[in-house]
Amino acid sequence: MYRHTLLWFTNNLRLDDNPVFNKARNSEQLTCLFIQHPRDKRTNRFGFKGIGKHRQQFLNQALSSLHSKLSLLNQALEVIESDYVEALSQVILRDQVEHLVTSRHTGSYEQSALKEIASRFPHLVITVLETHTLYGERQLPFALAELPDSFTPFRKKIESIEVDARIAEPDSLPPLGDKQGSTFNIDCSSENAFNGSEQSALDHLEHYFSSDLPATYKETRNGLDEWACSTKFSPWLALGVLSPKRIIERLNRYEEDVVANDSTYWIFFELLWRDYFQWYAHKWGNKIYHQTGPFNRKPLTSFYPERMKSWIEGTTPYPIVNAAMRQLKATGYQSNRARQLVASCLVHELGIDWRYGAAYFEEALIDFDLASNWGNWQYLGGVGADPRGHRQFNLAKQTQTYDPEGLFIKRWGGEEMMLPIDRVDYHDWPIEMK
Ligand SMILES: Cc1cc2nc3c(=O)[nH]c(=O)nc-3n(C[C@H](O)[C@H](O)[C@H](O)COP(=O)(O)OP(=O)(O)OC[C@H]3O[C@@H](n4cnc5c(N)ncnc54)[C@H](O)[C@@H]3O)c2cc1C
């Protein structure tokens, strides 16, 4: 029995299927902590922030929901805006913490903070648990270092392995520490179609699997605009408000009760993509940010500020890209098909270093997940897990296939302000416009 345990929440903002609570039981007192790093709100070397307004709002809702659910168990969520190591050290000293429990994270800042804490507090017991993936590392049928370089061999090796059952919500928790204040004061007003609370995630999951949509997912998943064309699980999955194991449990029930077909299999298939990128990020560490990727491939790119601005604002010569980029800015969401098209456009038509696209997505996406975002961008930048490399989408053909009547383009104003790729020459003189 520990005197005091600290649960450091990162991307596991839920009570359902969260193994960290099992470890907390074995303690006389408990502190639940979330740290928002000020770095996220500063401009990074690519000129973007680590978190934009859509995800911040969604995160605030998730934190508020976690706090409310913990309150029902006489607990509370403490939220500190600070450097990770400073915040953790402060709480460890204040509460005389003996046991620190957290979720395994792909982020290098989270990982190095844990290392630093371990060296500052040698007597502290640190437990890191897997909460973010379908499969744990021990279930992988290969050592992490042997993770295949592309998705298909990974999928073939793993898809027949059973996903572990999820863990139920805790029904009681140890009390708060004596010194912990209860100052939870976060704005969580809602303007977005997505709400970050755990109840919204569970309601959405139930609503989705109570409909006919899973039975046609494979045919509709490439749709550009309709809410119902894909599952929309990603924002909750990214922050860990929804457990991927819970999705599989509900999917299995749907397959037993309603139908099991190619489409229902494909939902599992896409979740395997998600797992693949998580393990890819764990395997390659900081190489997922490297311009040349883990395999040292040569990217085709450079940087043009004016083109970048056009891409972000949706004023390129490509209406479908403009529509998708305007949708992203307005809502924080973009369909998977649209993400592929805008990424291909940034790299191939605009000739820009893929990392600027990834960094902008990090700020703009409501469902930003480090591994999924940087892994997919490396893939499309031709330096990642794509065995074909340098995949370029034909934007005109894609428009014909996915927006034949131009409804998506019209809805998001994709033709409103189309500008030539370059408007200034190398002396920065304006080029005459027709
Ligand atoms: C350039 C680029 C950047 C991306 N960045 C992110 C990101 O930051 N966060 C994120 O969650 N997804 C990202 N994706 C993957 C994918 O586009 C989104 O997961 C998907 O569009 C979310 O909508 P959905 O939940 O309706 O997906 P669905 O089509 O319903 O898929 C179900 C779930 O499977 C997973 N999934 C589906 N496709 C992928 C994929 N290619 N890679 C990893 N997981 C996948 C997601 O968790 C998703 O919620 C990115 C894709 C591209 C091409």
Image (tube, helix red, strand yellow):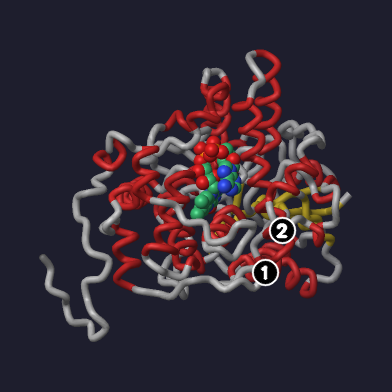
Three-letter code for the amino acid on which mark 2 is drawn: Asp
Location of mark 2 (residue): 149
Nearer to me, 166 or 160: 160
Q: Is residue 183 visible?
A: no
Residue type at mark 1? Phe
Task: Tell which quarter ligand 1 is in.
Answer: top right
Q: Residue 208: percent from the left, percent from the top? A: 53, 25
Neighbourhood count class around disc 1 (C-alpha, 10 Å): few under 14, some 14–19, many 20 upward: few
* Lateral position of residue 345 relative to residue 126, left or right: left
Left or right: 161, with 189 as reference point = right
Task: Report whether 2 appears left or right of 371.
Answer: right
Of callouts 1 and 2, the N-terminal one: 2
Task: Tell me: 314 left or right of 192.
Answer: left
Q: Is residue 258 above or below residue 344?
A: above
Asked if the residues shown at circle 1 and circle 2 are in contact, with their CB atoms under 8 angstroms apart, the answer is yes
Q: Residue 318, percent across and down?
A: 30, 54
Point out residue 138 in the picture as x, y percentages from the top left corner. Answer: 85, 49
Q: Quadrant of residue 119?
A: bottom right
Q: Exactly how many numbered labels are in the figure?
A: 2
**Measured along the vertical axis of the image, is residue 176 above or below residue 90?**
above
The residue lying at 41 percent from left, 48 percent from top is: 332
The numbered mark at residue 295 is 1
- Pick the quarter of the image with the C terminus: bottom left
Q: Is the residue 80 above or below the residue 73 in the image? A: below
Q: Tell me where residue 44 appears, x and y as whole percent.
A: 46, 72
